[in-house]
């Protein structure tokens, strides 16, 4: 069976996912839909797909089996529910939505209709991060005591982007909340977060923060520390450390070249990849391959709507904690 796929959104993420679909032998990229039809056409032309500005028609078309949603965040819920009511298999970029009540309603709709939804938490597919998870599952580090996640962007986004993103925790940190749950192996029950505006006043004027630290605590007392920043001048900083009763597992930054030159003057090495498309190239390809394979086999995806909802609850709790200066319990 070849899966006929439509990609919604012709921006950076839509283009990444469209390329992955077109390269997969088990899928056929049929349509790229975006209100900016010229942008959609630019992506579609080289991939042998059609372009349209009619997003509704593209999602509900009888010629489509599966929909990949890479539209702006404030359209995710609308597009997910439209695809669900049309009986499509769905992949959606994170977060599911901007507001927790609409996310809960959306997941209830998915469950009620019995359709499949995969959330775009691509970091679970990164080979380095998977190796850390495998070490935990094999018992090589023992019981998990601490998880430390570093996630720093090389530069802040435009202030205009912030207004529709949901804020630092829902937009950027939500990946880390998902990875934290994944590596801890149990649900955090309490969140304490601190946030500041130290980098770009425009982000503060837009109602967001640019620097944050978060502590998550599980029922048995395992802890996760997440540090987030919108500026790391040396590149896209993505690291993991897991401490257990028997040892530690780490995933360091990946670089364009692994060469090091050591002299009496010092050690020279490559900087990290500058931005996420280069750093997570393999992960993006693998997550779409997993989506296509699950859809073709009629099985549930490994990262479903419930994962998106739980990560969103942690993001909301972190936002509340920054605002109140107090820890927040998570149900």
Image: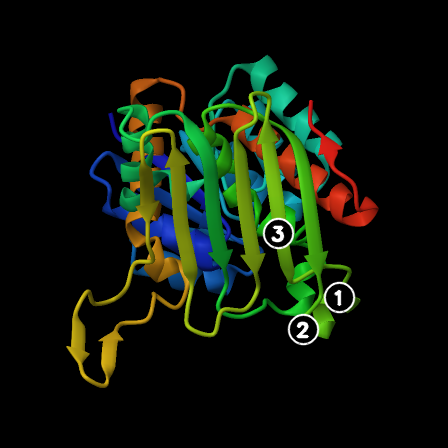
The C terminus - image quarter? top right
The answer to whether 138 is drawn above or below residue 43 in the figure is: above
Q: Position of residue 305 (x, y in %)?
A: 54, 27
Tag 1 or tag 3, which sits nearer the N-term? Answer: 1
Cα distance in 3D space between marks 1 and 2: 7 Å
Residue depicted at 40% across the width and 29% down the height:
65
Residue depicted at 53% across the width and 53% down the height:
34
Mark 1, residues whose alpha carbon is within 10 Å: few (<14), some, or many (≥20)? some
> Across the whole image, how many numbered discs are drawn on residues?
3
Q: Is label 1 in a helix, a strand or a loop?
A: helix
Residue with the mark numbered 1: 204
Left/right of residue 125 with respect to residue 184 in the rendered view: left
Is label 1 in contact with label 2 (beta carbons under 8 Å)?
A: yes
In the rendered image, is residue 275 in sight?
yes
Tag 2 or tag 3, which sits nearer the N-term? Answer: 2
Residue with the mark numbered 3: 213
Q: Position of residue 238 (x, y in %)?
A: 41, 55
Mark 3, residues whose alpha carbon is within 10 Å: few (<14), some, or many (≥20)? some
Q: Position of residue 47 (x, y in %)?
A: 30, 54
- Closer-to-camera residue (73/230): 230
Left/right of residue 128 with respect to residue 42 in the rendered view: left
Which circle marks residue 142 in the picture? none
Cα distance in 3D space between marks 3 and 1: 17 Å
Left/right of residue 18 with respect to residue 170 in the rendered view: left
- Closer-to-camera residue (285/50): 285
In the rendered image, is residue 72 in sight?
no
Residue with the mark numbered 2: 200
Residue ranking furthest to the bottom: 265
On the image, which quarter does residue 257 sit in?
bottom left
Cα distance in 3D space between marks 3 and 2: 17 Å
Residue ranking furthest to the right: 324
């Amino acid at each position: 069976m070849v899966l006929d796929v439509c990609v919604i959104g012709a921006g950076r993420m839509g283009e990444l996912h469209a390329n992955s679909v077109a390269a997969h032998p088990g899928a056929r990229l049929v349509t790229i839909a975006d209100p900016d039809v010229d942008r959609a056409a630019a992506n579609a032309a080289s991939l042998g797909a059609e372009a349209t500005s009619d997003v509704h028609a593209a999602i509900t078309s009888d010629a489509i089996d599966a929909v990949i949603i890479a539209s702006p965040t404030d359209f995710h819920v609308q597009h997910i529910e439209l695809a669900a009511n049309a009986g499509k298999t769905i992949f959606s970029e994170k977060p599911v939505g901007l507001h927790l009540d609409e996310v809960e309603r959306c997941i209830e709709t998915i469950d009620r209709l019995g359709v499949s939804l995969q959330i775009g938490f691509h970091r679970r597919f990164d080979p380095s991060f998977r190796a850390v998870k495998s070490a935990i599952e094999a018992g090589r580090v023992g019981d998990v005591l601490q998880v430390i996640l570093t996630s720093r962007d090389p530069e802040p986004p435009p202030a205009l982007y912030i207004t529709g993103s949901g804020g630092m925790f829902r937009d950027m940190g939500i990946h880390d909340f998902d990875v934290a749950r994944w590596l801890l192996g149990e649900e955090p029950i309490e969140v304490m977060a601190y946030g500041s505006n130290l980098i770009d006043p425009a982000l503060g004027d837009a109602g967001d923060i640019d620097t944050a630290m978060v502590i998550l605590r599980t029922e048995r007392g395992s802890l996760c520390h997440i540090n987030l920043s919108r500026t790391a001048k040396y590149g896209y900083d993505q690291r993991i450390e897991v401490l257990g009763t028997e040892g530690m597992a780490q995933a360091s930054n990946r670089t364009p070249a692994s060469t090091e030159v050591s002299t009496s003057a010092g050690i020279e090495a490559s900087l990290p990849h500058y931005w996420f498309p280069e750093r997570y190239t393999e992960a993006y390809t693998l997550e779409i391959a997993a989506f296509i394979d699950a859809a073709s086999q009629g099985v549930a995806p490994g990262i479903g709507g419930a994962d998106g909802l739980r990560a969103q609850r942690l993001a909301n709790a972190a936002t509340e904690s920054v605002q109140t200066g107090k820890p927040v319990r998570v149900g």
